[in-house]
Image: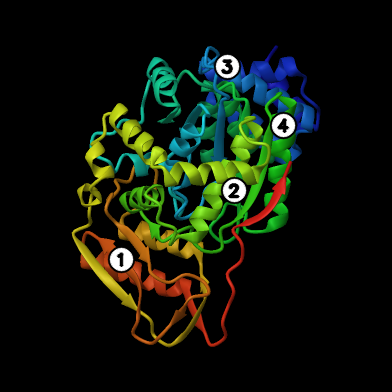
């Protein structure tokens, strides 16, 4: 089979067979054809699309292009969560240990941030010494012992995705829905999960800013997951404003720890956390309903078992576990600045994308792939949508390495903030459940 023939077939609107898609995954994983041919095929997929059966076959082929995680001997149900990315979305940090405390096995493969969206791995690496690049035996041992592991994609799991993902980013083919679905689910299929919850963000800070596009992706993800024999639910969640009270790597670790300690001041973060966790437990067979699952998650916050497991997980991955009890040990930026309201009223807009861009300007995010991060940089959001403010009242605290970054970050923050005369009621974070 010549790869050139596969390019031409999809270019002309043809439908690939499972064998042809297995060929695509194999050559991508092993580097058997030049990047320019894989790039041409990706562009053909973007232009011509794939149907549901093709998407399932491609996802399965990509999952089979390497090893599986190998958690078969575990008696616990295996579940994971995937988020399409947002601002302030450090939910995975608290969710994984809480779900494990409830009885799930949670092999949570995570990624890095790019642009205005944050990444779980970057947040974890703000803890001194913590390793996110674990080999498969380490991951298996940690999940068996603690019930969870937070780690980055290894070369052994879905290697075809690593190649195709990099080429999509470099060839403007990222928006192809079939390729998005296959990329997300191939890694989850390689984990051999019993349940998957998909957090599909909607709003200015999300990949999909309109509900229609997000809903289409969510339905495609759920259909494909079920086609792979993997029970799944998609939760559409709002990303018009940042999630929680903090944006930035060490700051979001702080928020996760405070949530696990029982702090409920970030109501939107807690709502998202419990909704996702409740569905993980429902699909994993450990609760009769998502509401019962959420209640079980709350109990693990109250008894401290989620916090204890997070501390154990940090220690297991080489991190300084003392930070869990003393948050002052987390990285801190050299400078801070209080931002004050220009007028009185109610916060009506706190644009998530612009807040994410402010975080990048402050040093907490990446404008390009290899940019170094300032782990202590970011924003504390003292006021969120619906909150009353008075003129000159503090609305945020910015953290950065120098005054120039603080100036840039403040300008961007003020672009994100709108204070209106009329009171605004904040919307629910959970918008829709797609099963």
The label shown at residue 194 is none
> Closer to the camera, 86 or 164?
86
Residue 182 can be seen, yes or no: no
Task: Decide which of tag 2 and tag 1 comes sooner along the chain.
Answer: 2
Which quarter shows the N terminus?
top right
Q: Nearer the viewer, mark 4 or mark 3?
A: 4
Q: Position of residue 26 (x, y in %)?
A: 59, 15
- At 52% from the left and 40% from the top, the residue drawn is 169
Task: Decide which of tag 4 and tag 1 comes sooner along the chain.
Answer: 4
Disc 2 residue crowd, few under 14, some 14–19, many 20+, Cα 10 Å: many
Task: Decide which of tag 3 and tag 2 comes sooner along the chain.
Answer: 3
Q: Residue furthest left?
A: 334
> Closer to the camera, 58 or 30?
58
Secondary structure beneath disc 4?
Answer: helix
Q: Position of residue 294 (x, y in %)?
A: 57, 45
Residue 154 can be seen, yes or no: yes
For marks 4 and 1, give the CA distance: 42 Å
For marks 4 and 3, give the CA distance: 18 Å
Q: Position of residue 69 (x, y in %)?
A: 51, 18
Task: Decide which of tag 2 and tag 4 comes sooner along the chain.
Answer: 4
On screen, residue 230 above or below 293: above
On screen, residue 392 above or below 39: below
Secondary structure beneath disc 1?
Answer: strand
What residue is shown with label 3? 65
The label shown at residue 398 is 1
What residue is shown with label 4? 224
Q: Nearer the viewer, mark 2 or mark 1?
A: 2
The label shown at residue 275 is 2
For marks 1 and 3, give the CA distance: 44 Å
């Amino acid at each position: 089979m010549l790869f050139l023939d596969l390019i031409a077939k999809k270019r002309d609107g043809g439908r690939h067979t499972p064998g042809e898609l297995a060929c695509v995954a194999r050559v991508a994983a092993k580097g058997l054809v030049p990047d320019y041919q894989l790039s041409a095929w990706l562009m053909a997929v973007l232009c011509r699309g794939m149907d549901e059966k093709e998407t399932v076959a491609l996802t399965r082929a990509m999952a089979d292009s390497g090893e599986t995680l190998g958690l078969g001997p575990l008696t616990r149900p295996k579940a994971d969560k995937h988020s399409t990315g947002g601002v302030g979305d450090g939910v995975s940090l608290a969710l994984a240990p809480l779900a494990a405390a409830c009885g799930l096995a949670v092999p949570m493969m995570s990624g890095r941030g790019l642009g205005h969206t944050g990444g779980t791995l970057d947040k974890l690496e703000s803890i001194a010494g913590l390793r996110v690049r674990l080999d498969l035996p380490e991951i298996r041992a940690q999940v068996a012992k603690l019930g969870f592991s937070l780690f980055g994609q290894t070369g052994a799991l879905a290697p075809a995705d690593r190649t195709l993902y990099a080429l999509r980013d470099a060839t403007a083919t990222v928006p192809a829905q079939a390729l998005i679905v296959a990329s997300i689910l191939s890694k989850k299929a390689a984990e051999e999960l019993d349940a998957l919850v998909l957090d599909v963000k909607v709003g200015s800070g999300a990949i999909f800013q309109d509900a229609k596009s997000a809903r289409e992706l969510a339905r495609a993800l759920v259909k494909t997951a079920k086609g792979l024999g993997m029970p799944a639910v998609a939760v559409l969640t709002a990303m018009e404003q940042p999630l929680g009270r903090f944006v930035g790597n060490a700051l979001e670790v702080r928020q996760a720890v405070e949530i696990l300690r029982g702090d409920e001041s970030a109501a939107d973060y807690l709502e998202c956390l419990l909704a996702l966790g409740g569905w993980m437990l429902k699909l994993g067979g450990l609760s009769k309903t998502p509401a019962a699952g959420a209640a079980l998650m709350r109990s693990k916050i109250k008894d401290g078992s989620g916090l204890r497991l997070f501390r154990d997980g940090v220690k297991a991955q080489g991190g300084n576990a003392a930070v869990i009890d003393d948050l002052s040990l987390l990285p801190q930026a050299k400078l801070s600045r209080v931002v004050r309201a220009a007028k009185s009223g109610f916060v009506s807009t706190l644009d998530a994308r612009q807040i994410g861009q402010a975080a990048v300007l402050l040093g907490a995010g990446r404008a390009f792939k290899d940019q170094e991060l300032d782990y202590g940089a970011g924003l504390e959001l003292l006021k969120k949508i619906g909150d009353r403010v008075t003129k000159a009242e503090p609305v945020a605290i910015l953290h950065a390495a120098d005054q120039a970054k603080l100036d840039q970050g403040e300008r961007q923050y003020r672009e994100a903030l709108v204070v209106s005369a009329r009171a605004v009621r904040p919307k629910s974070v959970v918008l829709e459940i797609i099963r």
